[in-house]
Amino acid sequence: MWHIGLCIAALVVISITYWVYKWRNPKCNGNLPPGSMGLPLFGESLQFFAPNRRWDTPPFFKERIERYGTIFRTSLVGLPVIVSSDSELNQMVFQQEGHLFQLWYPDSMTKVLGKQNLGSLHGYMHKYLKNMVQNLVGHASLKKMILEVESVTTRHIEKWANQETVELRTATADMIFDLTAKKLISYDLEKSSENLRENFDDFMMGLVSIPLAIPGTAHHKCLKGRKKVMKVLKNMLEERRAKPNEANTDFFDYVLEELKKDDTILTEEIALDLMFLLLFASFETTSLAVIVAIKLLTDNPRALKELTEEHEKILRDRENPVSGLTWKEYKSMTFTFQVINETLRLGNVVPALFRKALKDVKFKGYTIPSGWVVIVCPPAVHLNHENYADPLDFNPWRWKDLDLTGASQNFMAFGGGLRFCSGADFARLEMAIFLHCIVTRYRWQLVKGGGIVRTPGLQFPDGFYVRFSKKDKHN
């Protein structure tokens, strides 16, 4: 009997060895990029999600780029992945949307953002929804809302100045949520029985996380928050249908009008997922970018001085000192846009962009197999000394003669190609107006916190506590 047991044991060992070999040496019709697939099933997920407290390219990417080059293979949460910090490949990935590559989200993100969210839809439906969003945040709409953005921003900062200290990460998120929720769904926290804002607190931490829906995990908190928000949006949809708003004052009214059309391709599920995504995306990343800007300006007095001078000149040149910002004044904020671009480059609020190969793709002697996930890594591009001199330095002046609005091979803060972020101009507007309001009327001092950690999303784990004081009008 012992020899039968020995044979079974040998077969098990051979089977496991073969399985591990196949895992480490994936099938490919060509040459795979170099790299390691890590442990079976887990891959290199633990290394990818490991906390990092530096502005530099996360160690997971940096160490492998140094070892394998700008294109390498790995595995994350059981999926085969190609990681790219190669500017030419990144450009191909963006430009060949729908042909060679397609936008893709990890399961953890899809569950949170919704199966019918804007990012998961393709072709005509994606174009249709993107055009809808442009009605909200296109140039014509931004020109109309500039005074409203300034008013909301001013009101919030005045409230902060009356407090001993303010935790700026939470405060700016509240401010931007206040504005965008009103524009999207006419939501007013003071008049609502539901606090929508609090349900978004854990979203960024859980959005790109190990997808374990176990109580206490970031992913589980994320899903609970989504469920609550979707319930509120569903109830609001039913209320609007029962009692239409004839004034058509917000984006929800526009969506409802689309749903009423006989030939519409919009469904209720898609509409609700769209509202959810816009609520989340419009405040979370922008508020984080605002905090990064304040932190970097706090640490760089020269940049803060030049920024302040630009905005004080805007006030001096006005015919009516008490009038609000104009579109012409906004477009004149040259150094402000340099600060914003440098903030986005150095801050890397979006640490990774996900795509999937639709067919085998040949590039520089390598083959990216069909069905493999492709991760474009903005930090590795934005913090590459070959693309930017002294890349870890906050240097807004480097943008003086560069494009300040679009995407390029070396700047992808808002993505690129067909998937270039629809809200990019809105985000820049919010950041510019916030900086205008704060540097012309207030001083601030860091009280405590301000340290960062990436997991891989950017966080301020100890908060960002600031004390504001009003400037003397004669200064």
Image: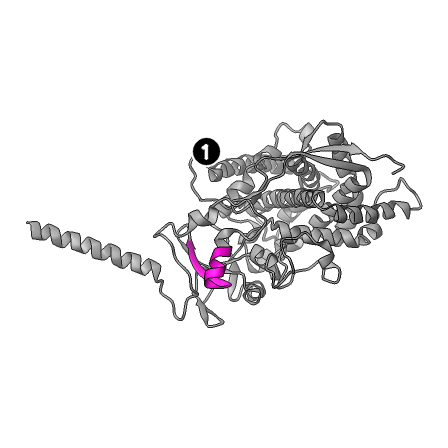
Residue 423 in sight:
no
Total number of numbered discs in the rendering: 1
In the picture as drawn, the residue positioned furthest to the right comes out as 319
Q: Which residues are magenta?
A: 62-75
Residue nearest the observer in this picture, 150 or 304: 304
- 124 to 325, vertically: above or below: below
Q: Quadrant of residue 167?
A: top right
Task: Give the residue drawn at x 42%, y 36%.
Answer: 214
Residue nearest the observer in this picture, 233 or 56: 56
Q: Position of residue 340 (x, y in %)?
A: 71, 51
Residue 143 in sight:
yes
> Which structural element holds mark 1?
loop
Q: Position of residue 225 (x, y in %)?
A: 53, 36
Packing grade of label 1 (10 A; few <14, some 14-19, many >=20) is few
Horizontally, residue 441 falls left or right of residue 360, namely right
Task: Give the residue drawn at x 79%, y 42%.
Answer: 439
Tell me the kind of residue under disc 1. Gly
Q: For residue 64: magenta?
A: yes
Q: Quadrant of residue 435?
A: top right
Q: Position of residue 398 (x, y in %)?
A: 71, 58
In the picture as drawn, the residue positioned furthest to the left comes out as 1
In the picture as drawn, the residue positioned furthest to the bottom comes out as 365
Task: Give the residue drawn at x 55%, y 49%.
Answer: 117
- 309 to 471, vertically: above or below: below
Q: For residue 340: magenta?
A: no
- State the residue position of label 1: 216
- 353 to 460, vertically: above or below: below
Task: Give the residue drawn at x 69%, y 48%.
Answer: 427
Point out the image quarter for the C terminus. Answer: top right
Residue nearest the observer in this picture, 304 or 23: 304
Q: Position of residue 249 (x, y in %)?
A: 73, 41
